[in-house]
Every structure is written in C-alpha cells, then in structure tokens.
Image (cartoon, helix red, strand yellow):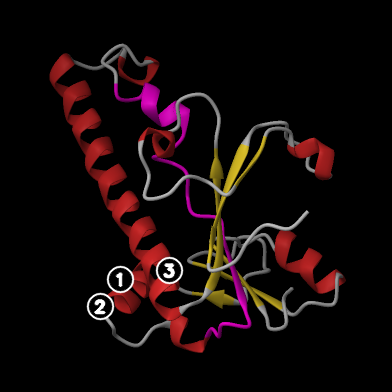
Amino acid sequence: EITGKVHCFFEQSGTFKNEFIKLGIPAEDYDIQNNFGETDHVVDLFGEIEAAYDSKPSIFDNISSEDLIMAFFPCTYFSCMSQMDLSWTAKNYRRISGREATEKILERVHNREVYFTLLIKMLQVARERELRLIFENPWGLQTFLKSGFVQPPSVVDENRTLRGDYFVKPTAYWYINCEATK
C-alpha cells in the first residue's frame, strides 16, 4: 500500500509516473535528462546517491517511509549484451587492434564497477533510512546481477506482456523494506 508519493528514479519518459497518477497516487520523475518533457526533477541521481551514502544533504532527505522509490537503474553494464562486450571476439572490436579492444574492455569493466558500486550504495541508503524501494533490471540469459548480487531478486517476471508491456524479456525486481503482493 502506497500512502505517500512514488519517486520514479532514472525514468524521464513519464510512463510509470503517469500510470501511478492515473491510479490516484502522486508520483514524480527524477533523471539527469528531460528528453520527453516529463522529468519533474532534472538531477544527477548518481551524485545524489553518493551524497546520501556519505550522509550529506540529498534528494533522499525529502523521501519518507510512506513513499515508494521505483528505481529503473541503468542496465547498460549489467545486461547480457554487456557481458558479450567483454570478449575480444565481440563484433564492436572487429575493426580495431587487439590493444584497442583490450583498452575498451578494461574501460567497460571499470565503468561496470562504478555503476555496480552506485547501485549497492543506493540500496544501502534505502535500507538505512527505512525507505521503501523497488529496483528493476533485466534478467535474461547471463546478466551480471545473476552472478552474485547483494541479494536475490524478490520477483522475476518472465513475460512482461502478460501485464500490458510490449516486451517479453525477463525482468527482475528487488524489494527493499517492502514486499511483493499478488
């Protein structure tokens, strides 16, 4: 039950915010971009996560335990496609030297570590502040989060089209300080 507001992190299209509003639940979007003209709060969420984790003022200060955070954390470095880009045989590297491919792979590994660290910090901020948070990310094939994340997903949706989405692709949801209901 949501008695407060829904804060949609990393979601600038208004898709989810507008669905919550249709249900009579106040909701707002937060993202670093506003390409769709729907973002209520144009903000660097990564900077806000770092600030909150370091006990500095952040947007998390304005979120209560009555609210819900829906976090669509960027999956760029966690998806199975990203895993394939860690191989010298990846199609992206076929026109560059072996040394250049290695440098690109090392950069991708570094970036994944940065995103992974930010994700874990965001979840820990929610845990410490007793904020309700649902984090979503793909769950197909060999995604990075399958290989030993801080906790297993609460729900795995194998076919999102059954709930009105256009995509069949499997999606996982992690619940922090709340539980899935049917």
With 26 as the anchor, is 67 left or right in this view? left
Q: State the residue position of label 3.
A: 45
Left or right: 144 in relation to 24: left
Category of crowding for the residue at label 2, using alpha-carbon neighbours closer than 10 angstroms: few (below 14), some (14–19), many (at least 20): few
Residue at (51, 24) in percent of width and height: 141
Q: Foreground: 25 or 44?
A: 25
Give yes or no for residue 77 being in the magenta stretch. yes
Q: Amino acid at mark 1?
A: Glu
- Secondary structure mainly formed by the magenta segment: loop
Residue 30 numbered mark, or none: none
Residue 154 % position (x, y): 57, 49
Residue, disc 1: 50
* Mark 3 crowdedness (10 Å alpha carbons): few <14, some 14-19, many ≥20: many
Identify the residue shown where x is 37% and y is 70%: 49
The residue lying toward the viewer, choosing from 148 and 57, is 148
Check disc 2 and report the residue beneath it: 54
On the image, the x and y values in percent for residue 173 come to 58, 49
